[in-house]
Amino acid sequence: MSNYNTVTVENDMDSADRITVQNLNNLLECLEDDYELRKEGKSIAIFDADKDEDLKILKKHIKSFKTVLKYYGEI
């Protein structure tokens, strides 16, 4: 029986890296937007109900994403 839900894609490392970097950049942008909205009191908690703690965690995550993007030579 054939499985129509499975797709196999062959990809080279450069393409995989570009996809990874694009996804990381998108997630970084979302985290930065979440940080700004939370800072302005315009969003709900993301990682912690305490606003100050939430902002600290968001900031750490943003820094981590930037570190990984530096590894890929994007920042």
Image (spheres, rainbow, N blue to C red):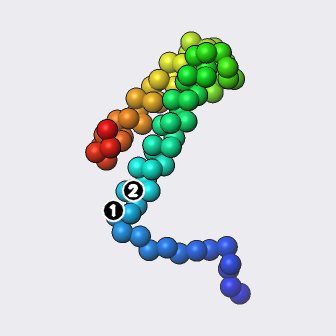
57 and 24: which one is in front? Answer: 24
Query: Where does residue 44 sit, x and y in percent of width and height?
Result: 69, 23
The residue carrying pointer 2 sits among few (fewer than 14), some (14 to 19) or many (20 or more) residues within 10 Å by Cα, namely: few
Identify whether 38 is placed above or below 3. Answer: above
The correct choice, above or below, for 67 with respect to 51 in the image is: below
Q: Which quadrant holds the C terminus?
A: top left
Residue 39, by quadrant, is: top right
The residue closer to the viewer here, 73 or 57, is 73
Task: Please state which of residues 32 and 16 is positioned toward the viewer in this rendering.
Answer: 32
Which residue is rendered at x = 36% and y = 40% of the image?
A: 68
Residue 16, horizontal then vertical, whole percent: 40, 61
Relative to 46, 68 lies left or right: left
Q: Say which quarter of the image contains residue 3.
A: bottom right
Determine whether label 1 and label 2 are within 8 Å by CB. yes
With 13 as the anchor, is 34 left or right in this view? Answer: right
> Hey, which residue is sitting farthest bottom in the picture?
1
> Which residue is at a point 37% across and 56% down the rendered structure image?
17
The answer to whether one can see residue 49 in this image is yes
Q: Which residue is mark 2?
A: 18
Q: Is residue 48 visible?
A: no
Report, in whole angstroms, how far the alpha carbon at label 1 lies from the one at label 2.
Answer: 6 Å
The residue nearer to you, when weighing 56 against 73, is 73
- Kind of residue sitting beneath label 1: Asp
Q: Is residue 20 left or right of residue 42?
A: left
Amino acid type at circle 2 is Arg
Residue 45 vertical position relative to residue 14 in the rendered view, above or below:
above
Q: Position of residue 52 (x, y in %)?
A: 56, 12
Q: Quadrant of residue 51?
A: top right
- Position of the N terminus by quadrant: bottom right
Which type of secondary structure does the marked residue at label 2 adopt? helix
Residue linked to disc 1: 14
Residue positioned 34% across, 64% down in the render = 13
